[in-house]
Amino acid sequence: MTEISDLDKEVKKFEEKLRIDGKKRGALMSLLQAAQETYGYIPKEVIYKINEEADVPVADIYGVITFYAQFRMEPMGKNIIRICEGTACHVNNAKNILASIENELKIKVNETSEDGFFTLLSVACIGCCSLAPVIMINDETFGSLTPDKTVKILNQFKKKEGVKK
Amino acid sequence: MREIKVGLGTCGISAGGNPVFQTLKDEIEKHKITIDLKETGCMGMCYEEVLVEVVDNGKSFLYSKMTSDKAKEMISKHIIDGNPIEDWIVKSEKITKEESFLKTQKRIVLRNCGVIDPGSIDEYIEHDGYKAIEKVLKGYSQEDVIDIIKDSGLRGRGGGGFSTGMKWMFANRAKSEKKFIICNADEGDPGAFMDRSVLEGDPHAILEGMMIAAFAVGADEGILYVRAEYPKAIFRLKEAIEKCKQKGLLGKNILNTGFNLEMRIKEGAGAFVCGEETALIASIEGKRGMPKFRPPFPANKGLWDEPTNINNVETFANIPWIILNGAKAYNSLGTEKSKGTKVFALAGKIKKSGLAEVPMGMTIKEIVFDIGGGIKDDKEFKAVQMGGPSGGCIPASMSDLKIDYDEINKTGAIMGSGGMVVLDETTCMVDVAKFFLTFTQNESCGKCTFCRIGTKRMLEILTRITEGKGKIEDIDLLIDLSNKIKDSSLCGLGQTAPNPVLTTIKYFREEYEAHIIDKKCPAKKCPALITYKVVEDKCIGCTLCARNCPTNTIDGNKKEVHFINQEGCIKCSLCFSSCKFDAIEII
């Protein structure tokens, strides 16, 4: 029950922001960012809501969503894994790390695990090159990885979150 | 006064800095010790993280590779009993293990990183912070400031290398009631992280640099465009802006001089092309980040068509130092045409990866070997990749090259923002070229046909070469396409996208030929051209590889030599990296 009312609260907050910032010039991106923060992705209905409130054509909103890597129109898993595919990670065999994650979770990049627990994304560079290869899970960065270590981190994550439930 | 500082930049945190900090906190409380425990930014020595500095009566002891257990022991032996644990210390009055990394560095941009608590405006002020803006507002005219920056010889650190003073002058001369100042903190080059470290470790220096620029060009609104992948940097900047407002350093009538400036953060949404000025402006306006034809330049018609001055993080971080120390102190460092220092992000196959700030004019060899400690696992040094996707690979044979904008341009690479990824004998140069093309092809905004389609075709050619299906004419075709893309693209992304391919062909043509003619990858990287095999004398039958194999293609009983069925092998390399006995070879 609490989860639903939390979401309601978030949605109210977003709608409030939409009402206040909607007409401000250049607000579209921050509105989309707020929408994604609220819903975890950008639902179609929200595009229409922004269209009405901010008076931006739906085509333009769609254009911005598809231009930037950050925005998604599909729901994501509970936890987002970002595998870094920057130069330093690439030459330090990030591909092995990717293989181990794909193998462990049975998903590929841009997919969500069956239980909805993890979504795997790739990112061009996390800016943590000295600890390559690295991954980010949500806002936390993990460095100097080996395939073994990566699997351990994934399992720890599952365990930790499992306890919270 | 005693204090303990823990390096908690993103690098320190990913190395396990948070638990160390917590342990120190708990131990200090438990033993009721009077000591200041603080967080600080990246100290540059990322290879030694987690770093903890103990300052005791003005004496500093820098502990490296700390863990919670080591932190506990350090508290009891050093802090309580007064006996520093020398084996763990990398730098103190007596111990100079890391002297080679630090000795030739000159820290201007990184002056406060890893020294002060980035969350404390007071500490920044104690370290000469906001003195430069005070000096400017109370004693200089706009022209004075522009002249100082021009004389200093500072050139844009984002990659372009244009004179910062000149840029300010253009924005200053543009006539308008409203002007903007923008900080480009959309550090998108894979392999570069110096801006992140400065944003996290010394946010106030960037704000102060922006304030000075705003005064010089006559702007009253500042925007920091920060990439969303840097949550900690965004947090630090928000906090810094808030504290400046409280102290009256931002807002109306700053320091009672009549100077007004508001500042805000705009989060990027993940588009590399937004590093380009006109695309960045479009993005702030809430549109797709697509570049525009120049002129008009942003200095005349930028954000919302008002005059706008954009500089990069590192450029701004230099400004307060130049104002306080004078143009001469800055331009006495460096080479004839490239003045001052440059921060390099050392990464890749290097022993000591981290941040190094050196005077311009230092050679690649000095940076890689003297500061960076040479190549990981003592493999052979092959090349450095400079300038990210817009740059190129400079071969080891040219490592006496002096680092300077113009010298680097001559090689076909560019200075870029300062990423320096070191490559060794196990790096395949065709694969590196393909890696960057994958990136630029993905990031091309699609406006210019040659950039949009040309990079796609180049990537296809490179892919077929790495799969052993290339033709010898492909090399010339790549060069031809490269030149056309460079000539017919509007912005820096397209104009430089072919550089990684051109430089690798220029310096490593034989590797391309080996892939095409001999169907071999000399570095043993390209999956289609290699085979994994079990070395029979070395395999002890531990079954680890078989258990790790995602396609169950490795056969063998316990304690017996294993066998890889080639048909099922997807060359994921997990067997190779998991084997503890070097019993998997690549041929």
Image (cartoon, coloured by chain):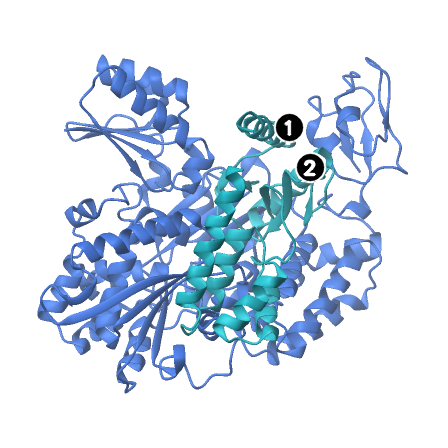
Q: Is residue A9 above or below residue B99?
A: below
Secondary structure category for the residue under label 1? helix
Q: Amino acid at mark 2?
A: Asp
| Residue highlighted by disc 1 | A148
Chain bearing tag 2 is A
Q: Quadrant of the N terminus of chain B?
A: top left
User: Is B52 positioned to the left or the right of B12 in the image?
Assistant: left
Looking at the image, tell me whether mark 1 or mark 2 is earlier in sequence order: 2
Q: For residue B510, what is the image quadrant?
A: bottom right
Viewer can see residue B258: yes
| Residue highlighted by disc 2 | A115
Which residue is more in the foreground, A158 or B79?
A158
Viewer can see residue B302: no
Chain bearing tag 1 is A
Identify the residue shown where x is 25% and y is 71%: B214
Query: Badge 2, how many Cα within 10 Å: few under 14, some, many 20+?
Result: few
Q: Amino acid at mark 1?
A: Asp
Q: Is residue B486 above or below residue B372?
A: below
What colour denotes chain A?
A: cyan
- Residue B321 in percent (x, y) is at 22, 58
Q: For residue B134, what is the image quadrant?
A: bottom left
Which residue is more in the foreground, B161 or A32?
A32
User: Is A130 positioned to the left or the right of B332 in the image?
Assistant: right
Which residue is more in the foreground, B154 or A128?
A128
What colour denotes chain B?
A: blue
- Residue A117 in percent (x, y) is at 63, 38
Q: For residue B341, what is the image quadrant?
A: bottom left
Secondary structure category for the residue under label 2? loop
Q: Quadrant of the C terminus of chain B?
A: top right
User: Is B121 positioned to the left or the right of B113 in the image?
Assistant: left
Which residue is more in the foreground, B418 or B502?
B418
